[in-house]
Amino acid sequence: MGGATNPSADVYNDGEVNIADVNAIIDIILGGSAPNPSEIETITVNGVSFNMVKVEGGTFMMGATDEQISEVAHYNEYPAHQVTLSSYCIGQTEVTQALWQAVMGNNPSSFSSDLNNPVEQVSWNDCQEFISKLNQMTGKTFRLPTEAEWEYAARGGNKSQGYIYAGSNDIDEVAWYSDNNGEYTNLVATKAANELGLYDMSGNVYEWCQDRFGYYSSEAQINPTGPSSGNYRIFRGGGWNQPARDCRVSHRYYNIPDGFWYNVGLRLVLVDEHQYVDLGLPSGTLWATCNVGATKPEEYGDYFAWGETEPKQVFDWSNYKWCNGTTDTFTKYCDNAYYGSVDNKMELEPGDDAAYMNWGPEWRMPNLNQIGELCNNCSIQWTMRNDVNGWLFTGPNENTLFLPATGYRWNSSLITGGSRGYFWSISLLSVIPDSALAMVLFSDGVNMNSSNYRSIGMTVRAVRVTQN
């Protein structure tokens, strides 16, 4: 049956009828659902295909929630806390030995009788090397899931039914674990899928996550990425030789990043398709090819007040998020009591960064050092591209970046559009909190740290943030 084309049975619309399609049909018959084909991207590497499933962002309670059996939940699963995530794509199955071999040219697994078993005996460091090569081969950007992304997907995302395990309260329906196996790994996607159509997120093999291990806080978080330091990396999901309690969706485990075991593998996350360019800058900073809200380099994109993450049509102090209507009533980002409540926050937190909140945790608005590096290390030319005025930055490696002359918005008007470009930085202007810093481009030059009222609407050109 594998490889035989049958449009009516090809649930995932990838040109093949295989075990994943059969299981999806069974799930549907039993009352479940498979991902819509529009939510799946099939990628092929050296003849090996795998599916990435779209997970719509949302808010959930992470950790030992009520259904997670308090008598067996570990203390590191507490406290349960609110997490909000942006959308992302995650592997429908664990990385198979076939895919690992197609990328790396070897198979380190202990249980290698079938290449459609999950790869194991791979360390966190090995996974980074695998992902780096996969990215080079595909031109895409994969990484390990953050721990929050992993748990949200295991719980079924915004389709969650609140199960103990990934897709069921009956572990035997969805997982290979010690009581129904206990001797070796099994073929991926041979148990039922969860609410998102993801397989084996409970059992078969543990799956490495990107994060370092750390204890939870009760505070609500947005796109968390774990501690910035620490000796251990997280893996999740339980394995073929683990008891049921270790296959719960909130169970956590961790170990050294250069360790490898025959019950630990990985699952991929595909980072958003926002493109970036490497200009050969000394810091390695990568600049987005489009403004936030745009799909082409020449498009202006969305306009944001500084510290706001949603575009709007009218910009003035009366509707600015971080004050009570006047410039002496600031409620956040203020270092001078004359202007309001002092908190001495001089750079945007992630939850108030339009790039981070609209594009995900790989992206941030640039800081002044990054803007200065761009302007000081690139040649800059006023030009026109596709009938749009703007500036062409040419980096030390001869790669180029186009920034359109977007102007800015005040009240409901667009001002200096087509003749000047205004791009927010992440930084507030010290001592004068009614203004933040920006890069302003003129036809004959550039101001790298211009101050502008933070209630006006300006565009955002994001930079890429390196993962921990």
Image: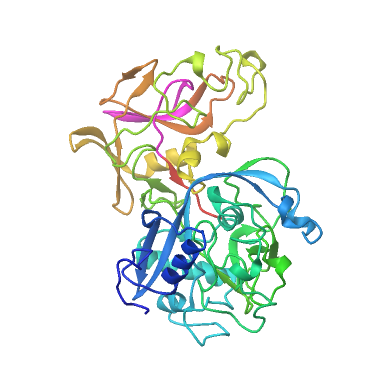
Q: Nearer the viewer, residue 193 or 324?
A: 193
Q: Position of residue 241 (x, y in %)?
A: 68, 77
Q: Is 160 rendered above or below residue 451?
A: below
Q: Tell me if 254 is positioned left or right of 350 in this view.
A: right
Q: Tell me if 225 is positioned left or right of 3 in this view.
A: right
Residue extent of the magenta highlight: 437-461
Question: Which residue, as the protein is rendered here, is positioned at the far right?
Answer: 71
Q: Is 323 rendered above or below residue 104?
A: above
Question: What's the residue at 63%, 21% (across, down)?
Answer: 331
Q: Position of residue 408 (x, y in %)?
A: 36, 23
Q: Position of residue 257 (x, y in %)?
A: 63, 68
Quadrant in which the N terminus is drawn? bottom left
Q: Is residue 453 magenta?
A: yes
Q: Is residue 377 magenta?
A: no
Q: Tell me if 96 is positioned left or right of 343 in this view.
A: left
Q: Position of residue 52 (x, y in %)?
A: 43, 61
Dominant secondary-structure state across the stretch colored magenta: strand
Q: Nearer the viewer, residue 32 or 157?
A: 32
Could you tell me if residue 443 is visible in this image?
Answer: yes
Q: Nearer the viewer, residue 385 or 107?
A: 107
Question: What's the residue at 74%, 50% (across, down)?
Answer: 66
